[in-house]
Image (cartoon, helix red, strand yellow):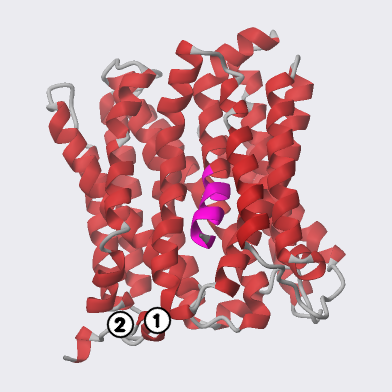
Amino acid sequence: MIPFIVGCALFMQMLDATVVATALPAMARALGSTPVRLNVAITSYLLAVAVFVPISGWAADRYGARRVFITAIGLFTLSSVACALSQDLPQLVISRIVQGMAGAMMVPVGRIILLRTVPKQDLLKAMSFLSIPALLGPVIGPPLGGFMVTYMSWHWIFLINIPIGILGIFLVLRFVAEIREETAPRLDWVGFLLSAVCLATLVSGFEAIGRDVMPLPVLLGLIGLGIACGLLYGVHARRVDHPIIDLSLMRIPTFAISTLGGNLCRFAVGATPFLLAMLLQVGFGLTPFSAGLITFASAAGALLMKFVATPIVKRFGFRRVLTLNALLTGLFIVVCGTFSPATPVWLMIAILLVGGFFRSLQFTGVNTLTYADIPPSKMSRASSFSAMAQQLGITLGVGVAAVTLNVSMSLRGAETLAISDVVAGFIVIGLLCMASTFSFRRLDPQAGAHLNGAKNSDDE
C-alpha cells in the first residue's frame, strides 16, 4: 500500500503542474484577465515547489514524516478548493503558492516514508509503481484539462483533488506508522535562504526561456543571480554540520550518477508533452482533447512497464539497463519528430506506447538506484536533494525545448511556429537524453545488485 499511497500524492502534484496550462484561456475569461497574465498561476506554483522542497527532509525529521505527509496532503487539498473558489488573479496566485508549498512537502516526505518502510530488496518493485504517476501526470493533464474545460468548467481541474486527497489521508492514517529521527538538527536558515533564492531564480529563468515574457537582460540576470547564490551555498554547505542541501551526498557514486544522468533523461518529462502539444495542435491542427488522446499512449506504455521492470533489471543489472535504455529512450523521442499530418494515428500511438515504456523503465531504474547506497540517517536529505534536482531538470527541459523552437524560427526568419521547428526540438531533447548514457557507463557493474539480487551479466 505504501507505493500506492505515495503515488496518489505524486499524481496530484504532477497533474496540477500540467493541467492548468490547458485551462488558461477559460480561466482568464472567468477571472477577467488574459492567458499571458494568468500564466503567473503556473509560475507561482513552480516557484513555491522549488523554494520549499529543500526544507522537506528537515521537516520530516523534526516533526515526523507521517504527520508532515498528512498535513501536506490536507493543505494541498484545501488550497485546491481555494483555487477553484478564486474570484480574481491575486486570489488564484496566493492559492497556487500555498498549493506549491504543500506539494513541495508532500512528495519528498512521501518518498521518505517509502524508503524507510520498504525493504531494499523490494525497492525496485516499489519504485516501478511510484514512477507511473510521475509519468501519468504530464500525459493525462492536458487531455483531462481539455475535457473538463470543454464539457464541465475550469473549476474541476482543482476540485478533482478533493476525493484523491481525502483518500490519501485515510490511507496514511490506516497504513503508515510514524517515522521520525530521535535528534533532528536545527534548521539551516542561511542555507535555506540561499537555496530558496537560487532555486526560485533558476526556475523562473528556465521557465521563461523562449517565451518572451521578460527582457533578455532580466532573464540573464535571474539565471546569473541563481548561479551566484548556488555557488555561495556551496561555500556555506562546507562550513556547517547539517546543511539543508547535503552536497556530500554527491560523493556517493550511485547517487551522483543517478542524479546527473537521470536529470538529462528528465528533460523529456517536461519537454515531450510540450513538444507533442505544439506538434499535434499547432502543426497538425488537432483539438487539445484529440491531441491528448493520442499522447495518452505513452502513459499506457508506462503502465505496461511496471510488470516487467523488476525482471529486466534483475536479469541485466542497473548499469547495462540504464546505459542501453537511455539510448532507446532518446531514440524514440527523436522518432516523434518524424510525425507528419500524413502519419497514421495508429503508428503514432504505437511509437508513443513503446517510447513511454522505455522512458518509464529508465526512471524506475534511476529512481531506485539513487537511494541504493544512502545510509538511513541521510535518507531524508537525499529525498529532498533528489526532489530539488528533479524539479530543476523538468523545468530546464521545457526551457531547452522552447529555446530550440525559437532558434529554429529565427534561423528560418519566421515568427510563426512550423512543424520543422518542433522536429528540431525533438532532436535536441532526444540527443540530450542519449547523452546520459555516458554518465551511466561510469557505474560499477555491480551497482545496485543488493537491491534485488540482480545478476551481473557483464561478468558472465
Q: Residue 194 at x, y = what percent?
A: 78, 59
Secondary structure mainly formed by the magenta segment = helix
Q: Front-most of 39 and 298?
A: 298
Q: Quadrant of the C terminus?
A: bottom left
Q: Dot 1 corresponds to which residue?
A: 448
Q: Front-most of 303 and 375?
A: 303
Tell me if residue 407 can be seen.
no
State the image quarter where residue 257 is shown. Answer: bottom left
Q: Residue 387 at x, y = what percent?
A: 59, 59
Q: Which residues are magenta?
A: 2-11
Q: Dot 2 corresponds to which residue?
A: 454
Q: Is residue 28 above or below residue 433?
A: above
Q: Residue 126 at x, y = what percent?
A: 44, 65
Mark nearest the camera among 1 and 2 is 2
Q: Secondary structure at mark 2?
A: loop
Residue sitting at x 33%, y 75%: 318
In the image as oriented, which residue stretches furthest toward the front?
A: 174
In magenta stretch: residue 117: no
Q: Tell me whether the residue at label 1 lies in contact with that at label 2, contact meaning CB atoms closer than 8 angstroms.
A: yes
Q: Residue 196 at x, y = what percent?
A: 75, 54
Residue sitting at x 34%, y 61%: 362
Q: Is residue 57 above or below residue 53?
A: below
Residue sitting at x 75%, y 50%: 71
